[in-house]
């Protein structure tokens, strides 16, 4: 099954995989080969990829994705995301600092606009931090 | 004839200027290469969004979606993309010329125009025109679609269009045709134009989550986003390319000036020596008489 991950900054990922887990409004759905045709919204979260059937969870690759759309066809999955970063591209300390900054912004927000923006940033950096942590855990094993 | 010392000083100062313009040329060249790559990178996103929209459009009437609705134009929003810094040849002047023309056209046709400026130069120019009503001015916009500043521009354009405050949104930007050719252009981003194909594919039987309508909203918005982002990237590539050419011309001119000045300086030095010799030999003649 082919997975193609496209963000505004270019094609992030395009290769054969066995399983993809994508975050949708109804929760995370796992997609295996021959999944029925489906077009769904994508919510900010962790997108995980398993290359081979026999790969253990530790070998999963993780991406931090923001909102977008996922299109599932016969043996092809197309993900259109505003932003998609591979675990290797995220520096954990930076993501953590950014999350703390966003939390601070939230506590100091003066109006609804600032509050909304802080919430958006918190969501985004929380996901990035999670992906960075997942990657660290897997490296350790 | 100017003294040798004055000429030497001038040559030195022109040489310094040449070094600076040369450095700016190299910086612009490397920035242009990067901008060009990013411009190419964002193309798959637009094409994917368009394909998806076509799939959904067959099921749901996308033509009646708020972002696609065509209305008679009474108010419009112009987004002017210029640069923060000057010294880029005619880059900003070309943009301002087109913008001024658009404003005149609108006034003649009784259209009320609002403007959002991107880049310090655009803001400075728009502020000087009495016809322009600037509703937003953005400076130092990063080349990043995730930046809050870009989202703010996008959202205000979409909100104004959906709330019927404006009937069209246009972007004035510089199209990057090639490294040697850039052209200022105005494109309509809202209402979003859309070509519907009757092509069917394996997605016809697809289920929609949460609903086709919500998906349509999300994708239509992304399409507009990709379009505006693309104009921004092309403008950036054009800016760097034009700055590179302008700086190359400046460097060449400086080199010409240096060789001219050196020639004048050598002539003047030689003239001084000749004169001195003539005076000495004249003096010797006088003594010997």
Image: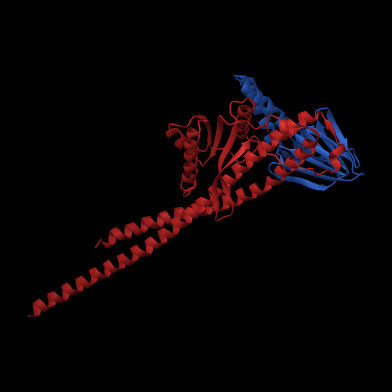
Q: Quadrant of residue B42?
A: top right
| Location of residue A34 in the rendering, given as x and y in whole percent from the top left corner | 91, 41
Q: Give the vertical position of B108 relative to B256 (above or below).
A: above
| Location of residue B58 in the rendering, given as x and y in whole percent from the top left corner | 79, 37
Q: Give the vertical position of B96 relative to B273 (above or below).
A: above
**In terms of depth relative to the viewer, which is nearer, B289 or B191?**
B191
The number of callouts visible is 0
For the C terminus of chain B, the quadrant is bottom left
For the N terminus of chain B, the quadrant is bottom left
Residue occupying image coordinates x 60% and y 33%: B168
Q: Is residue A137 visible?
A: no
Question: Hey, which residue is sitting farthest left in the picture?
Answer: B289
Q: Give the vertical position of A49 relative to B157 (above or below).
A: below
Shown in blue, the chain is: A
Q: Quadrant of residue B78?
A: top right
Q: Give the vertical position of B150 relative to B92 (above or below).
A: above
**In terms of depth relative to the viewer, which is nearer, B187 or B124?**
B187
Residue occupying image coordinates x 11% and y 78%: B285
Q: Is residue B9 visible?
A: yes
Find chain B in the image and tell me its colour.
Answer: red
| Location of residue A1 in the rendering, given as x and y in whole percent from the top left corner | 87, 45
Relative horizontal placement of residue A28, taking residue B231 as reference (left or right):
right
Residue occupying image coordinates x 28% and y 60%: B5
């Amino acid at each position: 099954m082919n997975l193609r991950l496209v963000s505004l900054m270019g094609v992030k990922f395009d290769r054969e995989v066995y399983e993809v887990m994508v975050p949708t409004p109804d929760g995370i759905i796992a997609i295996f080969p021959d999944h029925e045709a489906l077009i769904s919204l994508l919510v900010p979260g962790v997108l995980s990829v398993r290359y081979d059937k026999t790969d253990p969870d530790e070998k999963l690759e993780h991406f931090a994705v923001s909102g977008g759309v996922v299109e599932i066809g016969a043996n092809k999955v197309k993900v259109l995301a505003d932003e998609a970063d591979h675990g290797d591209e995220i520096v954990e300390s930076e993501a953590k600092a950014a999350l703390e900054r966003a939390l601070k912004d939230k506590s100091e927000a003066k109006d609804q606009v600032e509050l909304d923006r802080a919430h958006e940033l918190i969501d985004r950096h929380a996901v990035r931090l999670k992906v960075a942590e997942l990657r660290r855990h897997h490296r350790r094993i | 004839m100017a003294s040798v010392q004055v000429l030497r000083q001038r040559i030195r100062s022109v040489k310094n200027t040449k070094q600076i313009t040369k450095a700016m040329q190299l910086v612009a060249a490397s920035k242009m290469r990067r901008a060009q790559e990013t411009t190419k990178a964002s193309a798959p996103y637009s094409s994917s969004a368009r394909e998806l929209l076509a799939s959904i459009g067959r099921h749901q009437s996308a033509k009646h979606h708020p972002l696609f609705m065509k209305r008679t134009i009474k108010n419009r929003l112009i987004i002017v993309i210029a640069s923060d810094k000057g010294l880029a040849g005619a880059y900003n002047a070309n943009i301002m010329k087109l913008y001024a023309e658009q404003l005149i056209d609108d006034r003649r046709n009784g259209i009320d125009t609002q403007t959002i400026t991107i880049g310090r130069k655009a803001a400075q120019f728009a502020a000087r025109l009495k016809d322009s009503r600037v509703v937003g001015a953005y400076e130092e916009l990063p080349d990043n679609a995730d930046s809050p500043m870009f989202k703010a521009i996008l959202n205000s354009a979409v909100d104004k269009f959906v709330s019927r405050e404006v009937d069209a949104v246009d972007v004035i930007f510089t199209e990057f045709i090639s490294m040697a050719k850039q052209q200022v252009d105005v494109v309509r981003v809202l209402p979003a134009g859309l070509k519907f194909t009757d092509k069917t594919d394996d997605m016809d039987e697809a289920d929609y989550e949460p609903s086709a309508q919500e998906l349509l909203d999300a994708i239509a918005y992304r399409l507009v986003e990709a379009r505006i982002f693309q104009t921004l990237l092309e403008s950036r590539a054009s800016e760097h390319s034009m700055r590179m050419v302008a700086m190359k011309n400046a460097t060449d001119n400086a080199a010409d000036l240096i060789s001219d000045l050196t020639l004048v300086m050598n002539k003047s030095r030689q003239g001084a020596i000749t004169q001195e010799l003539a005076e000495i030999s004249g003096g010797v003649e006088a003594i010997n008489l």
